[in-house]
Image: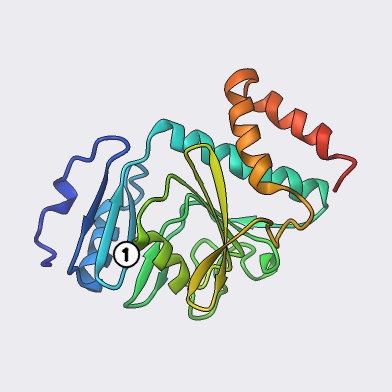
Amino acid sequence: MSVQTPIRAIALSPGSHLLIHDMSWEAYETLLHEFGEDCNVRLAYHSGTLSLMSPLPKHERAIVIMSDVVKLILRLQKRPWESLRSSTFKQQGLAGIEPDDCFYIQNYQRVIGKERIDLTVDPPPDLAIESDLTSITETSAYAAIQVPELWIYRDGSLKIKILQGQCYQDYIESPTFPGLAIAIIIPKVIEQAKIVGTSQALMDLEAELSDRV
């Protein structure tokens, strides 16, 4: 596909998703530059296929709560971390992805102070989290840049995916948080936040976990 195609002019309604095939890496990088910091459109690229998604407000709420839960647990466990939310991670010529949020935990020291990540010298995130991810393009892009753990929240449930070789396998437990029922905790807090508010739901979780982590 030529970079002259006016993809930038396409109006995506909230919640909509568009796939474009036969796109060159150069065209993808041009679009990244054109969209810039436009948080209303998320781009993912893998092997010639471009995915564009415009998130719904509920998407953003879920991500904020998921991120807060991760930070809460890490704080209770006294584990340091770095987050590079919505950064673009690229495997040159093959894949690019903008996580809803991502965390460096095991490798946090290697990215302290960095504003951009170069995967030729820097590690990928230890954990990426997504809400409403539906396209194989996004999942394939995560596998291509070798993100070891991926959480996907959709339709009230959380899937924990662990990279095995070049593809992801579903796991019941998170290796990052062994002994914690993350697949139960995340949906529970998101649903509780709709009733009592986010801050109260997080305080309730902290009280519940304080003696367990």
Against 51, residue 47 (above or below) is: below
Query: What SS does tag 1 mark?
Result: strand
Task: Give percent across and percent down for residue 72.
Answer: 73, 43
Q: Residue at x 20, y 72 (%)?
A: 24
Task: Give percent across and percent down for residue 141.
Answer: 40, 67
Observer-nearest residue: 208 or 74?
208
Compared across the picture, whether 141 is left or right of 28 comes to right
Q: Residue at x 65, y 56 (%)?
A: 172
Against 91, residue 16 (above or below) is: above
* Amino acid of disc 1: Tyr
Compared across the picture, whether 93 is left or right of 75 comes to left
Observer-nearest residue: 170 or 135?
170
Q: How is the image coloured?
A: rainbow
Say which residue label 1 marks: 45
Against 73, residue 56 (above or below) is: above
The outermost residue toward the right is 211
Task: Give percent across and percent down for residue 3.
Answer: 13, 64
Observer-nearest residue: 157 or 59?
157
What is the count of numbered marks? 1
Compared across the picture, whether 207 is left or right of 84 comes to right
Res 79 quadrant in image: bottom right
Q: Residue at x 49, y 64 (%)?
A: 116
Q: Residue at x 52, y 37 (%)?
A: 156
Res 176 quadrant in image: bottom right
The outermost residue toward the top is 196
Compared across the picture, whether 58 is left or right of 190 comes to left
User: Split into 4 quadrants, where in the image is the N terminus?
Assistant: bottom left
Please rate how many residues cluster around mark 1, counting C-alpha atoms within 10 Å: few if below 14, some from 14 to 19, many from 20: many
Res 90 quadrant in image: bottom left
Task: Give percent across and percent down for residue 153.
Answer: 52, 45
